[in-house]
Amino acid sequence: MAALCHEYDAEIFVDAIQALGATPVDVSWGIDYLSSGSHKHLMGPEGAGFLYVAERCAGSLKPRLAGWLGHEDPVAFLIGDAPALRYDNPLKRGAGALETGTSNVIGLAALGASLELLGQLTVPAIHEHVDAYLDNLEAGLAQRGFHTHRAKAAALRSTLLSMAVPDDVRLSKLSAALRNRGVVCNTPDGLMRFAPHWPNALEEVPRILDATDEALAELRG
């Protein structure tokens, strides 16, 4: 996608919140801009996140909002002996120009702690673990009449598993029945979605399948 964008002199902006922390992502693939909140696979708090801007795009970036931290030397007026407050300071070059105000310091500290742990575990190892988890879960659900929306090619997979439920089952009812049995899954766009991470052990999968059997039996009466 990045190569195609660049072929037509376009730029590519990636929302990476469904991948970062569990799926390897490399901005050197040709990504021009990448942003993410921290509350999903990065396992940080809500209200924190970041923006990446490629150096080649920094010069042409035109911010539509300006805050005091987005200018060069934003704190110069707070120190020193002579007045230094200026209203014509140029904007920083690149993503820094978009820092409109004081950051969520506690949220960023929490994100930093999570990133340190993820760095120790390594994202490729996390992805391999979750992929094995989902291999087993996908196969078990398929045997029970669920239809997978997961990519067949391993290289195209994230760490999400989306399944269509059997025709005779209502998704909302099944999700509620599973939740009552300690299994939490989201239901975006009419699909049942599982999003395990590194703390989820492979030994959980049989328990999920047992809970699914119980829930299906209950709903089918």
Image: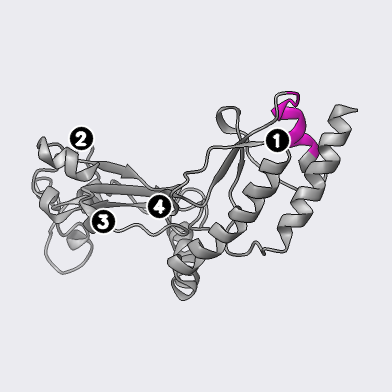
Q: Is residue 169 above or below residue 213?
A: above
Q: Which residue is mark 3?
A: 27
Q: Residues within 10 Å of mark 3 (few under 14, many from 20)?
A: few
Residue 174 image position (x, y, % from top left): 76, 33
Q: Are marks 1 and 4 in contact (CB under 8 Å)?
A: no
Can you give x and y, in whole percent of width and height, for residue 177 in the image? 80, 37
Q: Amino acid at mark 4?
A: Gly
The chief SS type of the magenta part is helix
Which contiguous range is marked in magenta? 168-177
**Label 1 CA crowd tier, 10 Å (few <14, some 14–19, many 20+):** few
In this view, the residue in front, 132 or 185, is: 132
Name the residue carrying label 1: 145
For mark 1, give the secondary structure: loop
- What amino acid type should be assigned to the residue bearing mark 2? Arg
What residue is pinned by disc 4?
Answer: 49
Could you tell me residue 175's position as x and y percent? 73, 36
* First-in-chain label (4 vs 3): 3
Name the mark nearer the viewer: 4 or 3: 3
Mark 3 or 1 closer to N-term? 3
Contact check, label 4 and label 2, Cβ < 8 Å: no
**CB-based contact (under 8 Å), mark 2 and mark 1:** no
Front residue of 66/143: it is: 143
